Amino acid sequence: MKIILALTIFSVVSMTALTSYAQTSNDAAAQACQSTGLIALKERAPEITDLVLDMETLAVSAADTTVEDVAVKTVIMGDAYIARGGQTGKPDRFVCLVGDKGKVLLTFFTAQ
C-alpha cells in the first residue's frame, strides 16, 4: 500500500514539476532529505551508519501541487549510498518530497 501511495505521489509530482536543477552540496532541501532519510533508515536497520547523497545525480524540481490536502513544494530524486558499518555498496535510487516550510513529507529508497 505504501509503495502504491509513493508511486502515485511521484507520478502526480512528476507531471506538475515546474523547474529542475542540479544540486549543490549545501542545498537546504537536500540536507533535510538526507538527515530525515538517515533517521528513517536507522529506525528500520540500526546497523546503518550513514546516508550519502550523490550530488552529481540529484535532480531537484520545484512543484506546486497537493496530494489530498498536503502541499508538495519540492521533489528531489537521485542516487544515495547507504553505509552499514562504514561500508557502502551500490547506490539506491531515492525520492524525497518536501512540503511547506521545508518539511520533509516522504523519503523513499529502492531496494537493490
Image (cartoon, rainbow, N blue to C red):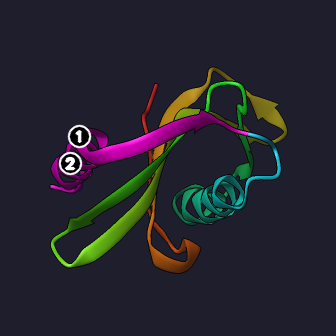
Q: Tell me which amino acid carries mark 1.
A: Met
Magenta segment includes 8: yes
Q: Tell me which amino acid carries mark 2.
A: Val
Magenta-tinted stretch: 1-23
Q: Are marks 1 and 2 in contact (CB under 8 Å)?
A: yes
The image shows residue 101, relative to residue 38, as above or below, that is below
Location of residue 29 in the rendering, given as x and y in whole percent from the top left corner: 63, 59
Location of residue 25 in the rendering, given as x and y in whole percent from the top left corner: 81, 44
Residue under numbered circle 1: 15
Can residue 8 be seen by looking at this rendering? yes
If the image is split into quadrants, where does the N terminus sit?
bottom left
Neighbourhood count class around disc 1 (C-alpha, 10 Å): few under 14, some 14–19, many 20 upward: few
Neighbourhood count class around disc 2 (C-alpha, 10 Å): few under 14, some 14–19, many 20 upward: some
Residue at image point 23% right, 56% down: 2
Residue at image point 60% right, 57% down: 33
Number of the label disc, if any, that sits on residue 84: none
Residue under numbered circle 2: 12
The image shows residue 75, relative to residue 112, as above or below, that is below
Q: Foreground: 73 or 97?
A: 73
Residue at image point 66% right, 52% down: 30
Location of residue 99 in the rendering, given as x and y in whole percent from the top left corner: 44, 70
Location of residue 40 in the rendering, given as x and y in whole percent from the top left corner: 55, 63
Q: Residue furthest front?
A: 18
